[in-house]
Amino acid sequence: MERDEPAGSSRFTAPHPYDSANWLSRVTLQWMNTVLKLGSRKPLGKEDIFPVREEDSMDQLVLKLEIKWQREVYISRAQGCKPHMWRALSRMFSWRAYMTLFILKVLRLLASVFLPLLLWFFLSYLEQEQQGYSVSTILFVGGIIVVVVTKGLTKNHYTGMTKIWGIRLKVACIGLIYKKILTKLKRSDVQEIISGKTINLVSNDARKIEKAVWDLSNIVFFPIEILAACAVLLTLIGWKALAGVSFYVVLICCIIVLSHQSGKLRLKTQEARDKRLEVMNEVVQNVRAVKIHAWEMKFAEIINQLRRREMWFVQLRGFIVSGLNSVGFTTAPLASLLSIITLIATGEQITAFAMFTILSCLNVINDSVTMAMGFSLPYVAEGYIAVKRIEKFMLRQFGLTSALFAKQDRRLKRKRCSTAVFRPESFRSGDTKLHSVSKTPTKIDTEKNGLSMVRVSASWDRREDRRALTNVTFFVSQGEMLAVTGPVGSGKSSLLMAILGELPTISGTVAFNGTVAYVPQIPWVFSGTVRDNILFGRHLDIKRYNEILDVCCMQPDLQNFSKGDLTEIGHRGVSLSGGQRVRVSLARALYSAADIYLLDDPLSAVDAKVGKHLFNNCICGFLSNRIRVLVTHQRNYLTHIPNVMVLNNGVQVEEGHCFREEDSKTFQFVSQTESAKATCKSPPHRPTQLPHQEDLGDQTLKIEEEDRNTGSITWKTYWSYIRTALRVPFVLCLFLAVLGIKGLLVASYWWASQVTQMSQEGQRSFTTLGIYGALVGSSFLGNIVVSFLVCLTLLLASEMLHNKMVLAVLKAPVLFFDKTLVGRILNRFSKDISVMDDDLPTRFLLAVEVSLFSISTVLLPIAANAWLILVAIPVVAVVLCYGRYYIKSSREIKRLEAITCSPVYSHILETVAGLEVIRSSQMEQGFLKSLFRHQDENTSAAIMVITSTQWLSVRMTTACSLMIAAAAIGAVLVTQSPGMSLSFLLESLDEVQYGVKVSSEVENNMTSVERVMWYTALEAEPGYSTRSCPPSSWPQRGNLTISRMSLRYTKGGPLVLKDISVSIADKEKIGIAGRTGAGKSSIVAALLRMPEPEGEVRIGYFIIAIDDLN
């Protein structure tokens, strides 16, 4: 847990510029100018991100969703049906917000329908009036501009509104998941659901919900848009023009079927991704064990096999989605062809007005169908699956001793109970509330301050035949200490877990008074300073703090630290030795001033002198008036403890008031553990600090800020991305195919304009219709084939980059893992890879096609009216300047958004690792606030990505309206193909905006490729570059020769081990002794080549430095 920022100092308390903006600034996004101007001058940093608005803050959103979810559960259970998360999510927004969205959508719909009508009347007027300009002409042109701007602004704002709604739902879901993990997840449930699945829930599933909100709005309104366009066709042309609409009916049916299959594939993809992330998480968390056993290549193979299985589903789904996206550009000409053939077959002549009306109305239908059904429906299906996965997680019953749902309060509350009793029936029924013993009969007198167990049996998986504890009974009064001992696996730690409520009980009762502090067997520390870890969010009482440092024997170590207790200890306390981590954990427990202390073998990780000091001054001295349960297997301490319990296989073998070797029938259990251990006295010198601390240096102990590139995504990045999958000739062929297909599509529009100038006989000729049909059909089929090829290429690139990244991460030195948050690494393998799998393959081709189509919508009107070039050049120049101005800032904001995701995931993983400590210390609220702070930073950046895109869209709308006005005025002067010119420019209004949006999405998503490529180039340990291997018979003898071996943990850092030379004969047993931090572990690290030592180390006759680490 990071230090809480002082009240009022957080930059999120500053006002958001939107709140002080006037209505015009809000409509035009003028309030974004400040940050965009700053971003054009320098790369933006975290300090330049706007503060989060209160309505977007995580604490508000989580509170609101929690209340809605509780209500949904309550109502559903009262009605006897299953609660649904989607209903709770839909209630997150007020009716006023829904009405605002509805009005914006209706205005955009009216503008879309009214614009073709207005242009139709305008062209009819031009055909009848030949005298040039008039008042009517000016009114028509002015009306066209007003409608165009209205259409663009309303679409821009409802798009931004729905996308921000999506972010709010994502944030609320992440907070709700985290809150359940923090308050209701038991240690027995961690391995089953937490490893890869929970990270997938908060990274991928929550993101799918975010994306689905905007897509859902398209689906809700698209029937209205289709009906309105059909009404215009029926009114202006007649029923014969509806022949093309029938094609969309068939298309919709196909899209629904394919989207259903896409949803199924998405579910299978998520399951495969969960398994891959679970293995990756285990590897990263235990990378030292992996490297010690030289399992890097084995785990790389396992992960790549899981990746191949995942990619099978990803590719099938990618083909479906890319195919649906590709038809959006070719279905309008195909539907137009059907309407035109029907009109010609019934004896109608195709005029320019009829062609224009058909193209305009069918384009409205095409946009609605392809956007709602082709683009949006698959994402809505994926979002629905994500909601169901989160719903399943939230409905899962966990057996913790807390209320089923958190209080409807903005803060997590955990009351200090005077007395608490845990019963097994609570775990079985799901009612996990704390019960007061004052109303519950028990044989133990809990009026006294004490801790008791009465005939407790417990099991991790709640099975009667697999008990961790069986019929355990004891009572400890205030000021007393109970020692628990027994062989490995006898149930000592399980006993403490049962007291904490982390281990489900089958029968019996656990009762205690007061608060509990827990020191785990494997000490848990978090990134921060020594002081942060001890205070654990509490206020500093310097007198008590120093006293605790003394009794925990930490003062000598802190004196050796360069910054004392303000020294950063690194991720997972990497800069501390095992004994130092134990003492930090113990000091944290002491500072909590709890009533009951559960100590899980804290004395085994320290040397004899420190252990004696801790036992006498800390456990028996400082805590003498507290209840203590001490797990230990060391006889020298057991003989001084009057009350000792011996466990074996979870059964209470013996409990006595004094543990003596001569009369204990169960001494054998302890002696089995002790026989393998020996205590060596250290020489009476000043304790030496662990090499990590002074050798890594202050800069390396602190978790480093995540690296990020600045500036534009270079063409080299794009080229390297594509070249990962294809050779240069194939890349060029693919690009030429894309150009060729787009040329066929533009040619079909051009031929349609030529048909309007033919006589009725010419229009009915087989050649005319044959050419039109060939152009439309070839562009339709070719576009689908090309989209499949591009999708396959980019998915192959994603798979190959993932595999390279796996290998690079596994070969990275252990120092990389010590300095890098686990969540930061997993973020590459979860969110970034998900972007490369799900978003880029479809968006990349879409951006190319939209960009090429946008260019054609400008060039074709110029070809029809050359005077338009006088307007087109300055308008295009302004558009390019705005685009370049925008992309400089939006790209950096997107990078910051990606970087600020990592602390969220790391915080969740860190929380899971220390669940028992956090809950026993009653620090849930502090950790929840830390998550809120991390997520608010990410939310602010994510919303700025959206608003910056809105800012550009408003300017694009203005530029397009100028071009349309120029074309309308030019139509008065030049009457050649005015319908085609205006039709194409109307298309440009949507296509240019959509092209900018999709292109910026691709540019922003390429930051994920950039981040993955960064990890593929991680510096590997030098031992992987050697190719020398010892013979298979090596080593024949176990003699070890060390000659002038030195070790430093970082390049250029101080030496940890200095010129060590020793020769150990075969079968000779050597012990390494020394105080805590003397360098014992560094010798082992040098022998294991983590990192590579200087000097020469021989095992037998072979120098291990030249051996390939593989």
Image: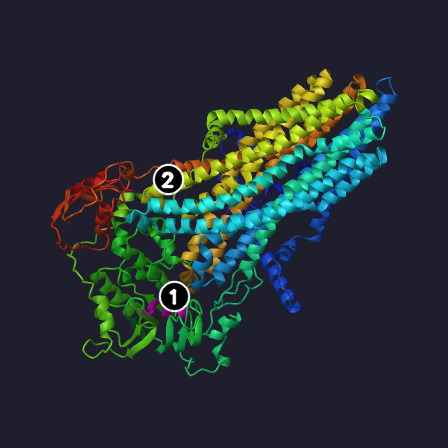
Which image quadrant: the N terminus?
A: bottom left
Q: Which residue is mark 1?
A: 517
Q: Residue at x 82, y 35 (%)?
A: 240
Check disc 2 and give the amino acid type. Ala
The residue at 59%/51% (across/down) is 169
In magenta, the rendered stretch is 490-500
Q: Report the coloring of the rendering.
A: rainbow
Q: How many marks?
A: 2
Q: Is residue 914 above or below residue 495?
A: above
What amino acid type should be assigned to the residue bearing mark 1?
Ala
The kind of secondary structure element at disc 2 is: helix
**Quadrant position of residue 994:** top right
| Residue 57 at least partly seen | no
From the top left corner, tell me how far across and down residue 664 is, in percent.
Answer: 22, 78
| Image spot of residue 341 (x, y percent) | 78, 30
Q: What kind of element bears circle 1?
A: strand
Residue drawn at (71%, 36%) of the image:
366
Foreground: 370 or 588?
Answer: 370
Q: Nearer the viewer, mark 2 or mark 1?
A: 2
Left or right of residue 839, residue 861 in this image: right
Magenta stretch: includes residue 498: yes
Q: Is residue 321 left or right of residue 829?
A: right
Using the image as rendered, state which of residue 1050 and residue 851 is in the foreground.
851
The disc placed on residue 808 is: 2
The prevailing secondary structure element of the residues shown in magenta is: helix
Q: Rounded to the nearest whole Å, what is the CA distance between mark 2 and mark 1?
A: 41 Å
- Mark closer to the chain start, 2 or 1: 1
On the picture, is 741 further left or further right than 865?
left
